[in-house]
Image (cartoon, helix red, strand yellow):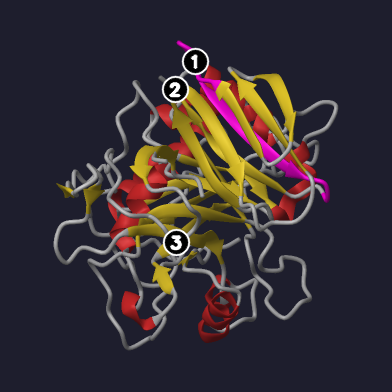
């Protein structure tokens, strides 16, 4: 039976002005969620046919049964597991060489990572030059290693006020930049205490570097507000970490501060086009250390090709997870249908959130609910051990 699938399955250096390079285009707001595509159901490896809402505009031919099939010579779309927030030795607060970082993710069956060292677009080989590319090594070599940088600024006295200490964190990942500024990049606005000005400086750097912006651990040391998050989305931020495994205390919020999910919903209610990611923010890879690898990831539906992966992230064609594996999340005849991989053990609860309100809980591996005529609907799947998967918001 054919179904419509929603593919979910601290540093400062010398001033360096990066060369200008076009940023990855963001999806247009409004209308149906870009998550919707069509494929034959059946799990992780059956992504036959390109996404009908492929932002690159690729279109295949119709097969005998009316399915779209990839153009001749084009790889099919598949489920790809990846991490959008990874550090190596060049970050300064990790001791792991790049080769060991790559080996860890390959051994744990990831398909791609984004190497996001602090204020540096790292080359894997000091003698190599990957300017103009969105990867830092041959994507056919195994694990796809996308270029990246974590724009890192740790000022004191931000407005709006956050932690009583006065410390605050302005951290923005850029995924897939094509520019390669030499050494550490000095990008921060140190003249203003306003968070929006500091984030504006990060987005200016992103525009010059190229790539896709991801807002990292937005509640670390507090200070993020719904209004600020919605404004950042309006200015082009498409990804926000709602589950950074290194900052579980800050993800959850407290009596005086909203959780990252509550902030996400508050921005979505304001009309933001914003996709939620999970990450490990890995710095440590030997089973020890403060920031170990493996605590969160995304699963995208795309061709196994770097540009296709970035486009899927920009369009929200992925789900985020810290342990739960989904078979699908589908818009089927006006309903969002979420299904856990049948091979996965455990008991599951599927919670539906509509316009910021929890509206239904379903015990089991499959749940469905009508997509509202206005606003959005998303889902969270929780296993009995507390692990979760987050389904991106869908709209009519």
Label number found at residue 135: none
Secondary structure under tag 1 reads loop
Q: Earlier in the sequence, mark 1 or mark 2?
A: 1
Q: Tell me, for residue 395, which label it has, or none.
A: 2
Q: Does residue 9 sit above or below 305 in this rendering?
A: above
Residue 34, position in %: x, y? 36, 34
Is-magenta flag for residue 380? yes
Classify 222 as above or below 141. above
User: Range of the magenta residues?
Assistant: 370-385
Q: Position of residue 255 (x, y in %)?
A: 85, 27
Q: Any mark on residue 375, and which?
A: 1
CA gap, disc 3 to disc 1?
32 Å
Query: In the image, which is nearer the foreground, mark 3 or mark 1?
Result: 3
Q: Which residue is rendered at x = 79% and y = 76% of the image?
A: 288
The quarter in which the N terminus is drawn is top left
Residue 45, disc: 3
Pointers 1 and 2 in contact (C-beta within 8 Å): yes
Q: Is residue 193 left or right of residue 318?
A: right
Give the camera-side residue of 221 and 382. Answer: 382
Which residue does the image show at 50% across and 19% down from the upper left?
371
Determine whether the residue tagged by mark 3 lies in a helix, strand or loop.
loop
């Amino acid at each position: 039976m054919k179904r419509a699938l929603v593919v979910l399955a601290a540093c400062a250096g010398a001033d360096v002005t990066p060369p200008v390079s076009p940023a990855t285009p963001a999806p247009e707001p409004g209308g149906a969620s870009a998550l919707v595509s069509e494929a034959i159901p059946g799990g992780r490896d059956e992504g036959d046919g390109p996404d009908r809402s492929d932002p690159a505009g690729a279109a295949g031919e119709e097969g005998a049964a009316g399915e779209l099939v990839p153009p001749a010579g084009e790889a099919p779309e598949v489920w790809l597991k990846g991490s959008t927030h990874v550090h190596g030795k060049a970050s300064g607060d990790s001791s792991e060489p790049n080769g060991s970082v790559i080996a860890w993710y390959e051994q744990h069956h990831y398909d791609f990572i984004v190497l996001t060292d602090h204020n540096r677009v790292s080359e894997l080989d000091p003698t190599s030059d990957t300017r103009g590319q969105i990867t830092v090594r041959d994507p056919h070599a195994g694990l796809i290693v996308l270029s990246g940088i974590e724009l890192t600024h740790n000022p004191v006295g931000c407005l709006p006020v956050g932690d009583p200490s006065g410390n605050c964190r302005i951290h923005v990942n850029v995924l897939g930049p094509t520019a390669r500024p030499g050494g550490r990049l000095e990008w921060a606005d140190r003249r203003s205490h306003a968070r929006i000005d500091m984030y504006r400086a990060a987005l200016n750097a992103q525009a010059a570097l190229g790539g896709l912006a991801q807002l990292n651990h937005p509640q670390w040391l507090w200070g993020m507000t719904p209004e600020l998050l919605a404004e950042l989305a309006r200015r082009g931020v498409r990804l926000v970490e709602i589950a950074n495994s290194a900052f579980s205390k800050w993800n959850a919020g407290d009596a005086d501060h909203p959780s990252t999910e509550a902030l996400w919903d508050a921005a979505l209610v304001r009309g933001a086009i914003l996709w939620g990611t999970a990450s490990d923010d890995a710095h440590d890879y030997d089973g020890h250390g403060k920031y170990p690898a493996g605590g969160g990831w995304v699963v995208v539906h795309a061709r196994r090709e770097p540009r296709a992966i970035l486009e899927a992230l920009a369009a929200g064609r992925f789900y985020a997870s810290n342990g739960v594996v989904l078979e699908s999340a589908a818009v089927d005849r006006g309903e969002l249908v979420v299904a856990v991989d049948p091979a996965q053990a455990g008991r599951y609860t599927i919670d539906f959130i509509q316009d910021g309100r929890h509206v239904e809980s379903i015990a089991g591996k499959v749940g469905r609910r009508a997509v509202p005529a206005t606003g959005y609907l998303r889902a969270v799947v929780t296993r009995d051990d507390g692990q979760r998967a987050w389904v991106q918001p869908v709209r009519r």
